[in-house]
Image (spheres, rainbow, N blue to C red):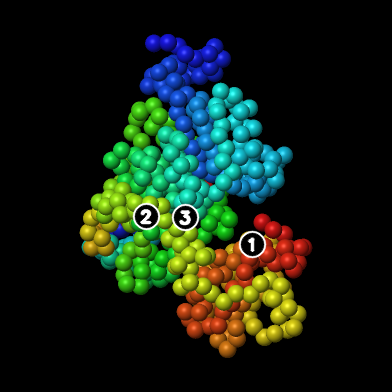
Amino acid sequence: MAVSIILPRALLTYSRGSSTLDLDVHCATVADALDELGRRWPAVLDRVVTEQGEVREHVNIFVGEESIRFASGLATPVRDGDTIMIVAAVSGG
Amino acid sequence: MSIDLSHDELLRYSRHLILPDVELEGQKRIRNARVLLVGAGGLGSPTALYLAAAGVGMLGIIDFDTVDLSNLQRQVLHGTSDVGRPKIDSARDRIVDLNPHVVVETHRVQLTSVNALEMLGGYDIIVDGTDNFPTRYLVNDACVMLGKPNVYGSIFRFEGQASVFSSGEGPCYRCLFPHPPPPGLVPSCAEGGVLGVLPGLVGTIQATETLKLILGVGDTLTGRLLLIDTLGMRFHTVRVPRDPNCPACGTREIKELIDYEAFCGMPGGAMAKDEAVDEITPRELAERLAAHEDFTLIDVREPYEWQIGRIEGAQLIPLGDVQDALATLDPAKEVVVYCRSGKRSAEAVRQLNAAGFRATNVTGGILRWSDEVDPSIPKY
């Protein structure tokens, strides 16, 4: 297994209920991993990145504990065994 | 050092008084603290109860709502006999019963850009237990301007988030989420549901962080976001750095409170116009159905909601399946869409419009249908 992507529960409607995607293909960057995510569940990717290919501003992507917004964005490198966590803003209280 | 606590208080707080890092001095700090709870709902309930039990001297509560039967699955501050009462009244009764030493200040107002600075200014720590994005950004910006810690919690379905913003050199909410989601993209708990115990979990974390801030002990969640997944029972912590470009706490471009409804693209706001969709009321839908007009009626809720009640003649296509179902719909016919309250169906209408369909949203969803057309449909 190369990289795992963990999805927020708000997006499971679009991933047929799956909360994790384990990618068997090699990914060098977060962008590579998201391409795979988009191939599997395009509607999930639509809610993570804009049509211009930028991460939506109510969404954060973390590689391990670190936000890619404060690293190299979608070009942030990933290594085998990394977990990419997608975190969306939720408003419930 | 004077004891300064009554016999009753010494006994009541005895487990704190023997606790290293609290002791008498800490308990007095707790008693001198002024904490404002924004919202007396799911998150505000456990926070209020535990902070009151701990002996926080002054608890302010802002809430505009009345207690509804559907609140009681998670809002443990209120009871069945409180249904219909203002939440601040049932909150005050419960808190005073739990700990009469607490001074409760209730505010039955909506927090707005006009009153927020004055309202929050009277307290040391603000606990964000609101249920909508505009108020979250309002609370954040006001806390940053006032230099007050914002103890954040948020929930959805089986997942929660908690952090401490605007504390010391730490980040603010905008550093984490610079912009809210477009309307309709992220459902609220009223639309998506929430596990009743989840706000209990997140709210007690907010209460814990509040007490740590008061006591000045431990490592708070400043600079970290705690992610709680109750189904996997996993707790993740990720780092949230302060963003030097953040308009609130970085560049400080935001010098006064703004129109947060507009910022979040809510009805009446500037962003809302781009998102507007064609609408009909439930009564108009009923008339068109009675006249046997030729259109496709789809229900974009989930199957378990469909089982609770549905509009005769509809077909079920949950929102997540709309894209896959496009090929099964007749492009020559108008598509009328409903859901529970009208938000998910508005999103479906946008997707249908984008795919070239003429689509119309039923405003207020099946809840309004139940109110205005068919009361036999249960509300949930």
Q: CA distance from mark 3 to mark 1?
A: 28 Å
Q: Which of these two is toward me, B146 or B1?
A: B146
Look at the numbered discs 2 and 1 and tell me whether their residues touch, using CB distance below 8 Å: no
Residue at position x 39%, y 49% in the image: B141
Amino acid type at image mark 2? Phe
Would you say B30 lies left or right of B289 here? left
Helix or strand or loop: what does disc 2 sit on? Answer: loop
Residue at mark 2? B177
Residue B85: percent from the left, percent from the top? 68, 43
Residue B201: percent from the left, percent from the top? 50, 40
Residue B372 visible in the snapshot:
yes
Amino acid type at image mark 3? Pro
Q: Which of these two is toward me, B329 or A24?
A: B329
**Earlier residue among tags 3 and 1:** 3
**Earlier residue among tags 3 and 2:** 3
Residue A8 visible in the snapshot:
no
Helix or strand or loop: what does disc 1 sit on? Answer: helix
Q: Chain of mark 1?
A: B
Look at the numbered discs 3 and 2 and tell me whether their residues touch, using CB distance below 8 Å: no
Label 3 crowd bin: few (<14), some (14–19), many (20+), radius 10 Å:
many
Helix or strand or loop: what does disc 3 sit on? Answer: helix
Would you say A83 lies left or right of A17 here? left
**Earlier residue among tags 2 and 1:** 2
Examine the image and state in which quarter residue B221 appears: top left
Q: Which quarter of the figure is the C terminus of chain B placed in?
A: bottom right
Residue at mark 1? B305
Q: CA distance from mark 2 to mark 1?
A: 31 Å
Question: In front of the other: label 3 or label 1?
Answer: 3
Residue at position x 64%, y 37% in the image: B90
Residue at position x 27%, y 66% in the image: A32
As drawn, the label of residue B134 is 3
Q: Chain of mark 3?
A: B
